[in-house]
Image: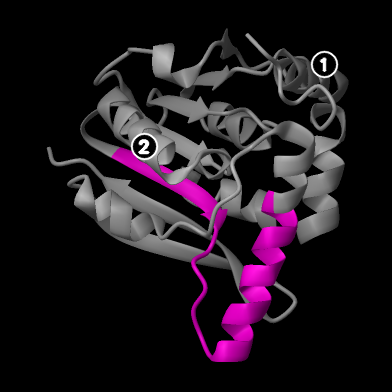
Amino acid sequence: MRDKYKFVGPIYDWLSAFYSGKSIHHCKVAMLDKLRPGDRVLFAGVGHGRDAVHAARLGADVTVVDLSATMLKKFQANLDREGVTVRIRQVHSDIMLVEEFEQYDMVVANFFLNVFDQDMMLRVLAHLIRQGRPGAHIVVGDFSFPTGNVATRVVKTLYWYGAVGFFWLFAGNAFHSIYNYPEWMRKFGLQVSEQKHYRLLLLDCYWSVLGRKPA
């Protein structure tokens, strides 16, 4: 399996902090307060993994899936460095090969769906929804769809293209416009019950979107 994050992976934490301050981290943990001890949670794409650690410390049974061996090694190094002892299951795989359907109480895609072009993003989102049990929470954290006046929308869009351009150039991710995740989640039959926004300076640049599968 080709590891697209050999270069970016080792500096992923730094890039996140440089580009957003603490906003991306706050966005990633925004909906984890919905968890109860013993809930099974799937994280698609591990990133720096602090959201997965937070979920495990809340008592959830956590699985993280990542295609990048570099990202998983970075995640494990962070666990070792910070002395994290909670058990987190790590799966080195393409998420589309994970077929643990209707096994999870929450499925989380934080800054993950944006690596794909629209057709593939929709396939991945549908696949992730299948992993959730009836009534499961589906969480998407990412760059927010531009709203507001013309100037605000332009700034948010340019800010997004700075990020997507970097990862297109150095990781081979797809180059595309910003996705309106609540719209697509509703089209897949989810009830979108909550959205939390996070700012960079005065702009709401990130959001965490909470959907729920029909029970």
The quadrant the C terminus occupies is top left
Is 114 left or right of 26, judged from the image as shown?
Answer: left
Amino acid type assigned to the residue bearing label 1 in the image: Asp
Q: Which residue is mark 2?
A: 125
Q: Which residue is mark 1?
A: 80
* CA neighbours of label 2 inside 10 A, class few (<14), some (14 to 19), many (20+): some
User: Which element carries disc 2, helix, strand or loop?
Assistant: helix
**Nearest to the observer: residue 29 or residue 118:** 118
Rendered image quadrant of residue 127: top left
Reply yes or no: does residue 148 show up in magenta: yes
Q: Nearer the viewer, mark 1 or mark 2?
A: 2
Whether tag 1 and tag 2 are in contact, CB under 8 A, the answer is no
Is 181 left or right of 200, judged from the image as shown?
Answer: left
Rendered image quadrant of residue 12: top right
Q: Residue 66: which disc?
A: none
Work out whether 117 lies above or below 24: above
Q: Residue at x 63, y 73 (%)?
A: 156
Asked if one can make out residue 22 in the rendered structure from this viewpoint, the answer is no
Q: Marks 1 and 2, Cα distance to the nearest angstrom?
A: 31 Å
- Region in magenta: 137-164
Task: Pinpoint residue 123: horizontal percent, then vertical percent.
Answer: 34, 33
Q: Residue at x 31, y 49 (%)?
A: 211
Is 106 left or right of 77, judged from the image as shown?
Answer: left
Task: Pinpoint residue 36: horizontal percent, then vertical percent.
Answer: 39, 34
Reply yes or no: does residue 5 show up in magenta: no
Rendered image quadrant of residue 35: top left
Q: Residue at x 57, y 46 (%)?
A: 29
Task: Pinpoint residue 104: horizontal percent, then vertical percent.
Answer: 33, 24
User: Which element carries disc 1, helix, strand or loop?
Assistant: helix
**Nearest to the observer: residue 35 or residue 49:** 49
Q: Residue furthest left?
A: 215
